[in-house]
Amino acid sequence: MRILVLNGPNLNMLGVREPAIYGRQSYPDLERYICTAARELGVEYDMRQSNYEGELVSWIQEAYGIYDGIVINPAAYTHTSIAILDALKSVCIPAVEVHLSDPMQREEFRRISFPGMACCKTVAGKGFDGYREAMAFLMMRNIEMRMKQQ
Ligand code: DQA
């Protein structure tokens, strides 16, 4: 099982950026957290971050035929990006949307998620643990799908 973990703009600023909302842990801390979680779950993963919408779109396209699942925190592109929504729909790879905070409890403009419309699950407001929950969900889903195919 191979999972692609994608993070959108400004998530590289974790630890510096609005710590009251996103916490004091840094992006390298998140990388370490995900490495440990993936090892415990027994999944292979790659993790990438970009501040550019097109780069995220390209990485989703390139995931076709390579990854069995996508965990994506599109960050601010959550609320604007039909391009990311279309890319997720194009590749048809099961995807889970993750947010460190809970956008539904924040400003009105954060209440819509375009990429979320192509995801089978959303995990929000659980900090780093949301990524682990997303990977575990994709792993279970993958096992269930394979059992059905037998
Ligand atoms: C975020 C929530 C978004 O609204 C925001 O633009 C982000 C981070 C989160 O992880 O809570 O950049 O996706």
Image (cartoon, rainbow, N blue to C red):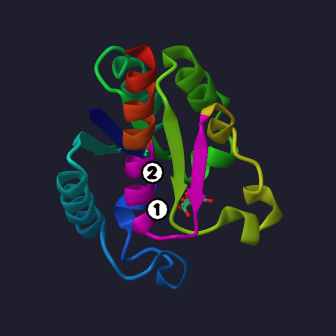
Q: Is residue 7 left or right of residue 109?
A: left
Is residue 50 visible to the viewer in this orientation of the structure? no
Q: Quadrant of residue 84?
A: top right
Residue at x-position 42% and y-position 36%: 70
Residue under pointer 2: 134
Disc 2 on helix, strand or loop?
A: helix
- Magenta region: which residues? 119-137
Q: x and y percent of residue 146 in the render?
A: 38, 23
Residue 67 in magenta stretch:
no
Disc 1 on helix, strand or loop?
A: helix
Q: x and y percent of residue 77 in the render?
A: 59, 45
Q: x and y percent of residue 30 in the render?
A: 30, 64
- Give the quarter the ligand 1 occupies: bottom right
Residue under pointer 1: 130
Vertical arrangement, residue 36 with respect to residue 16, above or below: above
Residue at x-position 45% and y-position 51%: 134
Q: Quadrant of the C terminus?
A: top left
